[in-house]
Image (spheres, helix red, strand yellow):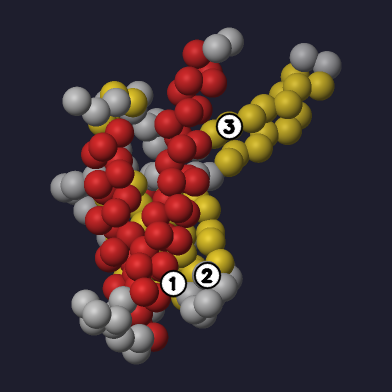
Amino acid sequence: MGTLLKGFTNHLCRFIAFRNGSPWLEIIVIMLKEFNCEIYPRKLWVATSFEDVKDKFVCHKNDEKPIEKYEDGNAYTYQCVMHKKSKKYGTLILFVFEGEVLGSDIVKRIAHESLHAVNSIFNELGIEYDLSNDEHAAYMVGWVAKCCWKVLQNEIYKENDESKD
């Protein structure tokens, strides 16, 4: 039996600062994180809400059409995307877990999407590997999985931190 984790919120984090009893500053933290791959010229973005990414990315190999929301599943890899503002190219992984999720299911989905992301980056850059020459691919899958975990652990443990108040 796996460890049961609280559900992900998939919402923006809002911080409101008050001055003299009135709100005067609002900061909205979007759950979208960019990672720089130092060995290949592509970015990796990991997000936990479609609302955080829907207007920020286009599919650069598809006439720069906006990315589409998928209705089924809870994790997606968007290949060959471009961040509209920065014009940077890369791959976007979106996790949309809702409700309670087993820890082993999170590991499975991270591994699954990590392989899709690596294959996307390698395909776009013309990098090949095979079953007996895959060390560079294995390294990249590990790096992508670590990036995903950095984003997802904030969502997982945020629930626990809020319950301490």
Distance between the alpha carbons at the discs numbered 3 and 1: 28 Å
Q: Is residue 72 above or below residue 6?
A: below
Label 3 environment density (alpha carbons within 10 Å; few <14, some 14–19, many ≥20): few
Residue annotated with mark 2: 37
Circle 1: element type: strand
Considering the image in quadrants, where does the N terminus appear? top left
Would residue 29 be found to the left or right of residue 91 on screen?
right
Instruction: Give the residue furthest to the bottom.
Output: 126
Q: Earlier in the sequence, mark 3 or mark 2?
A: 3
Q: Residue 80 in the image: state x and y as whole percent.
A: 36, 75
Residue in view at x 46 percent, y 38 percent: 153
Residue in view at x 24 percent, y 39 percent: 105
Q: Is residue 144 above or below residue 129?
A: above
Would residue 32 be found to the left or right of residue 133 on screen?
right
Instruction: Give the residue furthest to the front.
Output: 132
One can see residue 32 in this view = yes
Q: Earlier in the sequence, mark 3 or mark 1?
A: 3
Residue annotated with mark 3: 14
Mark drawn on residue 90: 1
Q: Is residue 152 above or below residue 20?
A: below
Q: Residue 73 in the image: state x and y as whole percent.
A: 19, 47
Would residue 86 be found to the left or right of residue 83 on screen?
right
Residue situated in front as seen by the camera: 23 or 139 = 139
Circle 3: element type: strand
Picture quadrant where residue 115 is located: bottom left
Q: Earlier in the sequence, mark 2 or mark 1?
A: 2
Q: Residue 125 in the image: state x and y as whole percent.
A: 39, 86
The kind of residue tagged 2 is Cys
Contact, mark 2 vs mark 1 (Cβ under 8 Å): yes
Residue situated in front as seen by the camera: 78 or 132 = 132
Distance between the alpha carbons at the discs numbered 2 and 1: 10 Å
The kind of residue tagged 1 is Gly
